[in-house]
Every structure is written in C-alpha cells, then in structure tokens.
Image (cartoon, grey):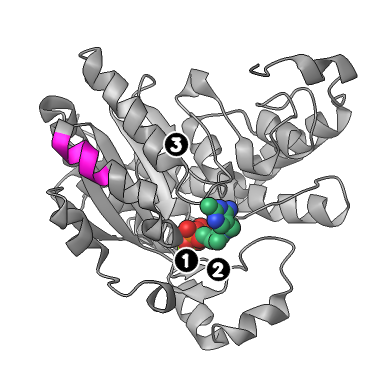
Amino acid sequence: MTKPAVETNQKELVSKEEMLSLYRLMLLIRRFEESTYRKYREGKIGGYLHRYDGQEALVAGIIPQLRKDDYILCTYRDHAHALACGTDPRHVMAELMGRATGCAYGKGGSMHLIDPDNGFYGGDGIVGGPVPIALGVGYAIKYRGGDQVCVCYFGDGAFNQGGVHESLNMSALYGIPVLFILENNKYAMGTRVERSTHQSDFLLKARAYGIEAERMDGMDVLEIRSRTQSIISNMRRESKPYFIEMNAYRFLGHGVADNPQQQKFYRSESEIEEWKNRDPIHLLGRKLEKMGWLDDSEKEQIEESVKLDVEEAISYAERSPEPAIEALYEHVYG
Ligand SMILES: Cc1ncc(C[n+]2csc(CCOP(=O)(O)OP(=O)(O)O)c2C)c(N)n1
Ligand SMILES: [Mg+2]
C-alpha cells in the first residue's frame, strides 16, 4: 500500500515519516540553540556564538535529502548545519565548550565546526569566506568527474564581498555544481540589507552572472524541500551552479553577547513579532496537526526525546576533558 503523503506546491510528495523527521530536526536545532545560550551565560561556552533560531527550515529543507558524499559549507552561524548533516549533538556541544571530544578537537569553537565524515566542510568566521572555498570544492567534483553537489550557505551581508562575485562568475563560466544558498535574514549585525546594498535584488545579480536563480519562502520547510529536490538532481546531471535566495529572518540578535536593547536601534518589535508568527517549526507543526499526523501527546513525545538528546549532549561535553597542551602542535600547517 502506498503511504499517504502531502502534495506540496511542486506536486512532489512528502511522506508523514519525512515530515515528522523534519519537524524533529528543526526542534532539535531550536532546543540545542536555546541550551547554548544558557551554557554561554554560565561561562561554560566562551568566545563568539551565533544562533540560528528562525532559520531552521533553510538547513532542514535541503541537507537531509543530500547524499553522504555531497559537501556542505557555511559561515559562523553553523550549529544548525552540523546538526542537519548528522553530526552527533554531543560532539557539537563539546566543541562549543572547547573539549577534546569536540568535532574540531576543541580547537575551533562555535564558528569552526567541521565534520567531513558527514559531508560538513565547516563553518567559517570570515563573512563570505566559504564561498570561494565552495567553488574550489565544486571544481574538484567536476575535475574528478563526480556527480556530487556542493551546497554553500552565506548571508546577505556577505554578498558585497569580492570573493562571492568572483565565485559566482567562475562557477557559471566553468559549470561548477555549487548550490549557492543566500540566507537573507534581512540584517548583517545591526545593518538592514537596504542600508548596505544598493541593488538588493539578489536574483538579478546572480542572473547577471548567467546563473539560474529563484527566491523561496525560508519559513516553509516543505516548500524548500520539494522545490530543491529537482534543482539538485538537475545539478548532478548537468554540472552547473544554482542560486537560491531564502526569504528568512533572524529572530534574535546577531550573537549571544548582544544586548537585546541594542536591537531597538535598528528594528521594531512588531517586525520581530510578525516574523515569529510564521515560525517555521510552528508552521510545519500546524500542517501536521491538520493532516491528523501529530497530536498533543505525540508532540510531547518528540519534545521529550529532543530534550534528552540536548541534555545528553551537555552532560557529555561537561564530562569531557579539555585538549592536552601537546595537542597544540597537532593539526597545524607549517
Ligand atoms: C571579512 C569580514 N568582515 C567583517 C566581519 C565581521 N562580521 C561578522 S558577522 C558580520 C555580519 C554578516 O552578516 P550576514 O552575512 O548577513 O550574516 P548573518 O550574521 O546575518 O547570518 C560581520 C560584518 C567578518 N567576520 N568578516
Ligand atoms: Mg544576514
């Protein structure tokens, strides 16, 4: 018997199991991010820390449908990308706490998560930094004759970096299979897109380089999931770049160290509320409820199992040792 499924805008079918797993992944990311804030306040996590609250659908809609031999890169707002790639939450939390069991051996911290075994080639502290690297990864795919894709996430603030434009140009010129995902969350720190970018129609710019481009609702994980499926399979067949602008929103301040009061200088509470009304997790939850696929007790069960995963990640990280002094000389080029 065929499974019941939801027909999305693109007439792709998404099964109940798939929808529930996307729901769980987004909830895991949200609860994980909330816990990082608590641990930061306790002084257990140091350095920079940028949360992904509100943007969960951008990773959940794409990464789980990739193959294990595909490549994913992103910037410093990278916890969600690692979790979506399947990096063990314990190894992500241990990295944030600078422990030897972290996915970068405790030497990278929040901005430099990495897990090549799961296709995750890293966060990057440099705005726009992963984009030229993704071009190189994509070039390697093409050079070796593979049919993998490289998915590269970067922010609206990054679009004005020279390396981004060079990479867009070269990817089109050489037919490099990079899926460029612009996480347009409307702000680069406290600067709204229109204040930093004279031409803020990003699709126009990508198309100017000869790259097919489209905009998606970054709050609707099913739309992203279904619309990217055929894009990715075409990229594998035809070896070419593609550009997607995600219409998204950053629910919180730029980083955890930001004073919430600062936000009043650059955005209104009503704007934040408006976007929170379209919280990607609630949107999918409501859809599942409407289908009769998620009731209160099932919701409670998912919430409980996510809570256990996050608690286990914290306790694992806190039990783990810090890197040994000698480890300073490991994994260093020179
Ligand atoms: C090359 C470079 N310039 C400046 C910074 C400082 N900086 C860190 S985050 C940021 C804003 C980037 O915003 P955006 O690309 O929109 O990403 P978002 O934080 O919204 O995810 C800036 C300017 C940096 N890390 N790297
Ligand atoms: Mg931004």
Q: How many marks?
A: 3
Q: Position of residue 74 (x, y in %)?
A: 47, 42
Q: Which numbered disc, 3 or 2, marks the residue that appears first in the sequence? A: 3
Asked whether the beta carbons under mark 2 and mark 1 sit within 8 Å of each other, the answer is: yes
- The amino acid type of the residue labelled 2 equals Phe
Location of residue 170 with respect to 50 vertically, above or below: above
Asked whether the beta carbons under mark 1 and mark 3 sit within 8 Å of each other, the answer is: no
Residue identified by numbered label 3: 73
Residue identified by numbered label 2: 251
Q: Residues within 10 Å of mark 1 (few under 14, many from 20)?
A: many
Tell me which residue sits at (42%, 45%) in the image. Answer: 59
Q: Residues within 10 Å of mark 3 (few under 14, many from 20)?
A: many
Q: Residue 261 shows which numbered tag?
A: none
Q: Which residue is at the front of the view, 222 or 190? A: 190
Magenta stretch prevailing secondary structure: helix
Quarter of the figure with residue 324: top right
- The amino acid type of the residue labelled 1 equals Asp
Q: Which residue is at the front of the view, 52 or 177? A: 177
Q: Which residues are magenta?
A: 168-173
Q: Which numbered disc, 1 or 3, marks the residue that appears first in the sequence? A: 3
Quarter of the figure with residue 215: bottom left
Tell me which residue sits at (21%, 48%) in the image. Answer: 227
**203 in magenta:** no
Badge 1 residue CB within 8 Å of ligand 1: no
Front of the two marks 3 and 2? 3
Mark 3 and mark 2: Cα distance apart in space = 22 Å
- The amino acid type of the residue labelled 3 equals Leu
Q: Position of residue 27 (x, y in %)?
A: 55, 50
Q: Position of residue 243 (x, y in %)?
A: 24, 49
Q: Can residue 148 be seen?
A: no
Residue identified by numbered label 1: 279
User: SS at mark 2?
Assistant: loop
